Every structure is written in C-alpha cells, then in structure tokens.
Amino acid sequence: MFLIVRRVVEFCDNLDKNWSHPLSQYPIIRSPLSVVAIVALYLLFVYKWGPRMMMDRKPFRLQRTIIVYNVVQVLLNAYIFLESSHLFVRMYSLKCQPVDYSVTPSTLRLARVSYIYCLIKMFDFLDTVFFVLRKKSQQASFLHSYHHAAMAIVCSFLYKFVANSHFIFMGIINAFVHTVMYCYYGLAAVNPDYRKSIWWKKYITQLQMFQFGIIFLHLTSGFVSNCGLPRILLALLMIQTLFITLMFGEFYYKNYIRKRPAKALN
C-alpha cells in the first residue's frame, strides 16, 4: 500500500514539474493530489459521514445560508462569464485554439479567471452538502454528485496542464448557465412556494442539455481542426460530454415527460 501511494505521489510530482502550464501556479489547483483529496472528502461526506451524522438529528433549515450562497454563486458566475468571454473572444480563435504559453498581462488575467472558476467548481459542492444537512437525500442523487465531482476534476486538470486554450470556452458557457440556474435557486430559497410558480424551472434543465450540445460541437471543432491540442484529451471530453448529456436527458424524461400522462389523468 505504501509503495502504491509513493508511486502515485512520484507520478503527480513528475506531472507538476514537467507538464504544468507556466501560469497554473496558484494554490490548491497546483497539486493534483489536493484536488483528488478534496473530491474524495466531498464524496465521503455525501455518502457516508453526512448521512451517519444526520441519522438521529432533525434536518437543518439553512434558509438564510442558502439564500446568501445562491447570491454569491450568481455574482461569481456572472463575473466569470463576462470576464472570460471578453478575453477569450478578443484573444483566441473559436474554431481551434492551441495552448497559449505566453506570459502577458492578458494571459495572466485569463489564467486568474480560470483559477477562480475551478475554485467555484469546488464551492459547488455545498449544493450537495446542504441536501445532506437538510435530509433531502433524494436530491443528492448520483447525477448530482457525479456532475459536481467530475466538473471539479476536469476543470482542475485542464487548468493545470492546458490553461489558456480551446477548453476555456467550456467554462464560459457553463458560467452563463450557472448564473441563470442559481438565480432560480435563489428565488426558490427566498420562498419555497415560488418553486410551484417559477415556470422556467424545467427550461433550466433544457438549457443545461443545450450547453452540453454546444460544448460537444466546440470540442469536435478542435478535434477536426487539429491545431495541436491533444486529440486523446478532446476525445475523452467528448465522451464525457455525451455521458453527462444522456444522464441529464434521463432526468428530464423522468421529471418532465413521463409524469405528464399521470397529471392529465388527474
């Protein structure tokens, strides 16, 4: 066991020294081991420690905390969307953008925004933590936790090794979708009765699936154009995008399509 851990540490150290992007030197994301450890702790809390801790306790209300959390999420994601889209469109090609290793005020600024975005993907973990603390176990689904964990790992990996490249577009689209999504969550948290009257709830899921479609096409553009990006990485991200799209599609079908006949009968 010790030998395995040692090999993993040596492998991560080699990646850090020989393959890291020169601008990806900020704390936490700098170390792949730190990211893996944080994701592991998140999953342990969601599926083991949290439910055990809450087993004999009443659910926490957390309404004010959740309202503040959603407001912060809206502000952070709106900032990421506006800042990164402005820089990306001005500096790079939408068709296929190789990794930019230059060190300039603009590239430093974009790398800093990417870093903040990666931290937000870990901040997103609080969504599931709140579900556990409120004993909303049905909402802490596999789709929910997998999506958050995968986003944190993928984002950190891309920032660490291929920062300031074609993949930034994924974060731009995602930040816009999350701005809209947390607006809805914020309104619903202010008054739970709003959940029944906010008509655009199901369209958020549609927007998320549309987002994955745009991201897949953008990754395909990079794969076909072959501007020097690792094709194996593009292919893996395309597969991941298809997988998460299918999962969201199944969720949408179960919650907004399959339930319609039952409602009509009533």
Image (cartoon, helix red, strand yellow):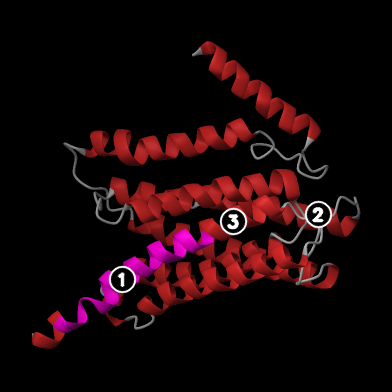
| Residue 35 visible to an observer of this rendering | yes
Q: Where is residue 186? Give x, y as percent.
A: 42, 68
Residue 17 lies, with reference to residue 121, above or below; the image says above
Circle 2 residue: 99
Say which element carries label 1: loop
* Kind of residue indicated by mark 1: Asn
The answer to whether mark 3 and mark 2 are in CB contact below 8 A is: no
> What residue lies at 76% left-to-right and 43% top-to-bottom?
24
Say which element carries label 2: loop
Q: Where is residue 130? Give x, y as percent.
A: 35, 50
Q: Please state which of residues 67 and 208 is positioned toward the viewer in this rendering.
A: 208
Extent of the magenta region:
241-261
> What residue lies at 63% left-to-right and 63% top-to-bottom?
170
Circle 3 residue: 237
* Kind of residue indicated by mark 2: Val
Left or right relative to 13: residue 243 = left
Residue 153 lies, with reference to residue 216, above or below; the image says above
* Kind of residue indicated by mark 3: Leu
> What residue lies at 58% left-to-right and 60% top-to-bottom?
238
2 or 1: mark nearer the eye: 2
| Residue 190 visible to an observer of this rendering | no
Residue 205 lies, with reference to residue 129, above or below; the image says below
Q: CA distance from mark 3 to mark 1?
A: 38 Å
User: What residue occupies the far top of the structure in this picture?
Assistant: 2
Circle 1 residue: 191
Q: Main secondary structure of the magenta part?
A: helix
Q: Where is residue 110? Give x, y as percent.
A: 78, 58
Quarter of the image for residue 166 reads: bottom right
